[in-house]
Every structure is written in structure tokens, then in C-alpha cells.
Amino acid sequence: MHATRRLAALGLVATLASGACASVSETRVATVNGDTIGAEALEDELMAIQGNERYREIVEEGLARQGLDLRVAGEGQGSFDTGFVARLLSLGVYYQLLEQETRARGLQLSDADLEENRPQAVASVGGDQVFEAFPAGYRDQLIRRQALTRRLQELIAPTPTPEEARTYYEEHRGDYVGVCVSHIFANLATRGPDEARARIEDLARQLGEGADFRVLAREQSDDPAAAAESGSLGCGGRGRFIPEFEEAAFTLPVGQVSGPVETGAGFHLILVESRGELPFEEVQDQVLQTLQTQRTADFSTFIDQLTCEANVDVNPRYGSWVDACDDPEAPGAVVPPEGPAATAGSGEAEAPADASTDPRAGGR
């Protein structure tokens, strides 16, 4: 798994957050650099998720969007899907590594840190109503996980400042180019594909015979807003237009009208009025987002390194740990065992043939 995908999974503080470190007197689920994750803590979290119907639906909907056919509950009464348990435990390992790193750096989470991160923890589970349906201890845990991740991320890869954005812009001015563009449009939805294509080809023919672009745009275009401006769509940078239109707008010579350009909306004749560098004030947010994406990747690389250096051992009842160090495309993750799904309180995961997950298949 790519580093940023792994970090994105960690960012889902509440979506799949795992149990806290437990005492060695509990049944061992896993050890992470000598710290134990206990069965009681894992089962408490599973029960918290199982008992929150709306949150359980949110989790399962999220897994489905990833193309994963996983459920919280297993096939047996009171059981849990071992694929889901393995994913939950995988996150538990990552969060335990973050706890250890926090201790090693002598960092403390204050009450103010926890309070500051509460809104994000609440939002990550789907809002106040879902959050308040969890037991109090689990709510505290979710807030702590959010605060822990944010504290380390700010230390390892801090949020970029406006001053850093300005410096980056000056060094990459060529990446921030804007275009002023006009078009004549034939609408696919109202005309249908054949008529729309024939319409734009006829308008292109008229231009070729000397017709004025702005007159045709004003009188013949299917885009009434642009027609009122003689076809003008104004000026902007990349990301403003749909891909096919944008590609033409940023490659056409200035002052030249394109041939018919097909997009999902219809057909266009495009005229580039001008193209040039955009001022920093117009692209500051975009520059900050670029820098933030880089910082996110930096933090994810840091997490990858922690994982590669970790000594992780999983109780075979719950699966096995797959190391990521030798394969940068594979996550460090728990692979579920073979056999029927785990039952709450059993301390075992013995489970169903359909309860499996490939750790390469996407995030935790």
C-alpha cells in the first residue's frame, strides 16, 4: 500500500480505531515492541461498534466504497467478521506505535489538546448523535486517538504557513498558469449526441467561412450564461474546467479556435483569449493544499518507517502480522485466521470461509 493510503486510513480516527494497551494479565491479542494489546480491550471496542447501529452502518458503507464485502458481525450469533476484526487490530498496532513514539519523545497530551480535538473526533464518526451513542470510555479513546495523531503530525510534518506558500509559489510559478477562455456550446442533454455533433460541426463550418466567433457565441450557443458574455467563461487556473475542456484550453494557441471538443456535457468550440501566470493571491489556497499534501505524505512515510522497525507479534487466534518492509506496496497488517468468526467473550477467532481480506486491497 502506498504511504498516503496508509495515512488516510490512520486519519479515520473513529472509523476503525483499535483497543488501547492492556495489562499483560489479559489474554494477549498482540504485542507491539513489548506492549500488549489485550483481548478485553479489543472486545470492548467491538461491542461499542456493534452496539451503535448508525455507526456500524457508516463503517460498513465505507468498507463497501472501498470494494470490500465485509461486515462487523460474523455469521454466528454474537460473532464478529474476522476480516473486520483483523482490520481493527491492524489499526490498533499503528496507534500503539504512535503511543510509543509519543512516550519516546516525552510528549504529553493535555486536557486542552483533548478538548481541541474533540470536534474532529465527533465529526469522524458522523456527528454528535452517533458519537454520544458510544460508551463514555470509548468516546474518550476516540478523542485521544485524534489528538495523538494530530500532535505527532504537527511535529513531524507541520501545517504549512503562508510564508512557506509564498516561497513555494516563487519557486514553481510555471505551475500556476491561468487561462481566459470563451466557447460556443452544443448541449448533449437537450439535443442528443447526433444532433449536438451535427450542430457544432455546422458552427465550426460557419467560423471557417468567416463568421464572427462572438456573434455565433452570443446568438447560437446552448450556454445562455456564456452567450450573454459573447461566449466568455472568464479566467481561471487548472481544475476549474472538466478535463477534456481543460486540456484544450491549456494547449491551444492563444487566439485560435479549436475544432469540436467533446465532453460529457456536449460539444465545444473553444477560443483561448489569453494565458499567463496567476498572481499568488489567486492561488494561495491551492499552493497551501499542495504543501499540505506533501506534508501528509511525509508523515505517512514516517509511519511506514515506524512499522518497518516494529516488532509485532499477533496471537494466532486473531491472525498473523504481515510485514511491509520488504514490499512497499503492501501494508503492515493483520491477516485474519482460517475458521468461524470470533464470538464476543470467546477470545477466539475461528472463522468463516468468506471472512478474509487481502491487506493489499486498501487501507485500514
Image (cartoon, grey):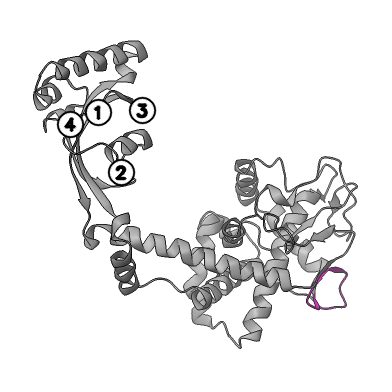
Q: Is residue 272 magenta?
A: no
Q: CA distance from mark 4 to mark 3?
A: 18 Å
Residue with the mark numbered 4: 225
Q: Farthest bottom residue?
A: 106
State which tag comes first along the sequence, 2 or 1. 2
The image shows residue 57, relative to residue 176, as above or below, that is above
Residue with the mark numbered 2: 240
Evaluate if marks 2 and 1 touch, with contact meaning CB atoms under 8 Å apart: no
Label 2: few (<14), some (14–19) or many (≥20) C-alpha neighbours in 10 Å: few
Label 3: few (<14), some (14–19) or many (≥20) C-alpha neighbours in 10 Å: few
Q: Judging from the image, what secondary structure is the residue with disc 2 in?
A: loop
Return the residue nearer the eye: 325 or 230. Answer: 325
User: Looking at the picture, which amino acid does disc 2 mark?
Assistant: Arg
User: Looking at the picture, which amino acid does disc 1 mark?
Assistant: Ser
> On the rendered structure, is 178 left or right of 189?
left
State which tag comes first along the sequence, 4 or 1. 4
Quarter of the rendering occupied by the N terminus: bottom right
User: Looking at the picture, which amino acid does disc 3 mark?
Assistant: Thr
Q: Farthest front residue?
A: 253
Residue with the mark numbered 3: 263
Evaluate if marks 4 and 3 touch, with contact meaning CB atoms under 8 Å apart: no
Return the residue nearer the eye: 64 or 284. Answer: 284
User: Looking at the picture, which amino acid does disc 4 mark?
Assistant: Ala
Evaluate if marks 2 and 3 touch, with contact meaning CB atoms under 8 Å apart: no
Label 1: few (<14), some (14–19) or many (≥20) C-alpha neighbours in 10 Å: some
